Image (tube, coloured by chain):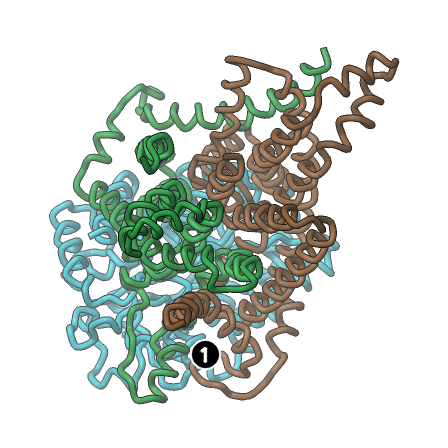
Amino acid sequence: MVRRFINKFYVLLVFLFLYAPIFVLMVYSFNDSRSRGNWEGFTLRWYVELFSDRQIMSALYYTIIIGVLSAVISTIIGTAAAIGLDRLGGFRRELVMNITYLPVLNPDIVTGIALMILFVFARLQLGFITLLLSHITFNIPYVMLSVLPKLKQLDKNLYEAALDLGATPGYAFKTVILPEIMPGVITGALLAFTLSIDDFVISFFTTGSGVSNLSIAIYSMARRGINPRINALSTLMFLIVLALLIIVNIRMSKENNGKGEKNYASKKQVFASASSSDRVSSSRLYELEQQ
Amino acid sequence: MDESVIKMFEKEYGVRVVYDTFSTNEDMYTKIKSGGSNYDVAFPSDYMIKRMIDEDMLEKINLDNIPNYKYIDQRFKNLEHDPNNEYSIPYMWGTVGILYNTTMVDEPVDSWEILWNPKYSKEILMMDSQRDSIGIALKLLGYSLNSTNPAELEEAKTKLIEQKPLVLAYVVDEAKDKMVAGEAALALVWSGDAVYGMLENPDLAYAIPNEGTNLWFDGAVIPKSTQNKELAEAFINFLNEPEIARLNAEYTGYSIPHVEARKLLPPEIVNNQAAYPEEHELDNVEVFVHIGDMLKEYDRIWTEIKVH
Amino acid sequence: MKRNWALTPYLIWMIIFIVVPLALVVYYGITVNTDSGVAFSLSNFKRFAEPIYLRVLWRSIKLAIISTIICLIIGYPVAMILAGNSFKHKNVMVMLLVVPMWMNFLLRTYAWLTLLEKNGIINSILGKFGLPMLNILYTESAVILGMVYNFLPFMILPIYSVMSKMDYSLIEAAEDLGANSLIVFRRVIFPLSLPGVVSGITMVFMPAVTTFVISRLLGGGQFTLIGNLIEQQFLYVGDWNFGSTMSLIMMVIILISMLFMNKADGPERSGGLW
């Protein structure tokens, strides 16, 4: 019993360490004082200022647009690539897979500066387009890594059988392959979206005049010092994240009512969530999932 | 720059203005130089304007399109970095000095030496800008802040490394807020940040040490990358409307070379010695000169100091 | 036919946006600009071997290793407890562990900035209880704290993942055979959890060694890491050649540490317990 209590207490302490800073930010987002030390009364001023802050609002706009566009485009290219790759074998497959892994394993800063050099070299104006291209580039591997295992599980004979029965390749794909790999595609798309909205380093190097995402906006504000608007922003983002997680969790446990399945779902979620913050981790966790 | 000024311009001309800020001249220069951007107007300082002219990065400005140029104080026209104002229109000016908290510093602040005083260990904010920080070390040692003499630079480096244990942090933009919040006793700042800080926190004061300092002039320039030179000129002219220039000066705290707008400024700014210092305070000032290839040496020295 | 059609767009994409950019980094890394044009040169590698840059490299590796070790020490027990039967709702606990990671990385770092300031929140709380002030902002400790805070879950999750799949009959068998809990841990649990530990170490070490944000925000510009140097070369100094050289060196470091980790991981998996 004592040991169990110590265990729980220890975990609690670590959770406190993880959560305390976030909660403090949340509480102080309602503090009517610019300097943070003292509590000087409740206010919603920072929230009002947040929504009239042009820099943040434009960053929010770009974050969402880039997130959606890059997720859709990388899902299409990545899924197609996975299907094409699934039928490829031997050396060529190895080669393509190894290159695909490069942006996953490379430090973000290297990917960022490499893309920046490319864009400047190609005389592309740094801005929205280059940001979008970069996000698609780092998203595609994750879509592929989500779809490939689904394809592996797929019974190839089904597709052949559909063709034999006179289905056009397109129709066979739509009715036989796509439904089977759909969970992987959706995971990939969601992963791509979260990676995109969370990215800082690659965006930092590949964006240009006037276009920035939330991460970049936060960085430039944080460099200028403490800004209570950031506290307000943190609070909102935390609540949104929490709400999304709860919704996803409820949906997943509804979908998987079987006992074993449920466990799988939560683990899968860990993988998806973990990777949202760090792409290196996602690949590693992914490997764990495969073992 | 005051965002409302930008909004007014947008309204008047039906365009969308993209406004980015950079911590230092070097940041901005690298961004424009490396390509991949198409800013129409930029506001670098004197030595950087000279460098950009030398490297053929700027468009000539047609003064006929900038009637408000007439408001600019004669003292700020035809300066050395751009003798005929062919490439730049004076925008703001100021000094580099020490912003200090009078509740924490009880001795007179009249020498750069105070930034080396162990009494204020971990209470000093230095500027993460190589020309400024190396410049004041050179000044303290009695050299020109445009020195290209390796021996003098080496001495400045040693001096700055010696100072490092006393420094709380090397920052640019954070300095004024940190001083307002009482996080440090002394900070090396540009005069405009000092004005801002002093208005926010009455305990703060600004001093230009006797050894002299850097006097700088920011100008509006049009980079070669511009896609709409007329509009760029219209924007520069707009900024020099007396009322607009006043708004901007009040917002940034920096001193303006604009004769009419200065008359409109509230007394707490016009009479602020940080913003508009007395002539005698400017006895020993120097303007930064573009130092050409020696920049690499400055880079190396600054890296060495920060890494040490 | 169809397979080519599906793969082709990606192949083109991959070549333009993965292969070519890296080739450009290599190109810039091994050349210098001279008056007569671009010339092949390894002089930037030589420059990196100067003491000041080696000191930065050493500091980056040192801080990353310290952070990784702290994460391991704090995180391993957490993973073990979570995988055990202390908590009824394990899934909820794991989810709670993951939630802070969903917060934007910069916001999490920024949070510490406000906490650690001299007149910040921690000190105002300490002050109320008459406790001594904590002045660690803009020190190495602050940078390490930032790293540990940001990357701790990356250590816990993979270890947890391996441990929760562990075959508990093995542990019971060992206990039945009279092994005490220390021996069980040393001979059974720890070796079985090693793949997770290795993943965790990689996942903490790699982002820690390459970061430039944490050192910039919490280190006050005093603790230049290799990431900061690279950033400076590209955004401030404009020396792409030297920046590329350092990027190449960083890639090699990452590659070596991955190989090293895979080696540490490998024999365990095949050799296992017996």
The image quadrant that residue B280 belongs to is bottom left
**Above or below B62: residue B181:** below
Which tint is chain A?
brown
Q: Which chain is cyan?
A: B
Which tint is chain C?
green
Residue A95, image x, y percentages:
50, 18
Instruction: Specify the subunit that label 1 lies on.
Output: A
Write the residue at 60% across / 75% down.
A46
Residue B10, image x, y percentages:
70, 58
| Near-viewer residue (C183 or A266) | C183
Quadrant in which the N terminus of chain B is drawn: bottom right
**Above or below B54: residue C148:** below
Q: Going by the picture, which residue comes out furthest to the front?
A: C177
Residue C257 appears in view: no
Write the residue at 33% across / 47% down.
C190
Residue A107 appears in view: yes
Residue C11, image x, y percentages:
60, 20
Counting labels gives 1
Q: On the rendered structure, is B210 left or right of C82?
A: left
Write the residue at 53% across / 53% down.
A216
Q: On the rendered structure, is A81 left or right of A16?
A: right
The image quadrant that residue C187 belongs to is top left
Q: On the rendered structure, is B169 left or right of A143?
A: left
Please, what secondary structure does the residue beneath circle 1 have? loop
| Near-viewer residue (B36 or B108) | B36
| Three-letter amino acid code at the position of disc 1 | Arg
Q: On the rendered structure, is C151 left or right of C68?
A: right
Circle 1 crowding by C-alpha within 10 Å: few under 14, some 14–19, many from 20: many
| Near-viewer residue (C101 or A58) | C101
Q: Which residue is mark 1?
A: A36
Residue B137, image x, y percentages:
20, 60
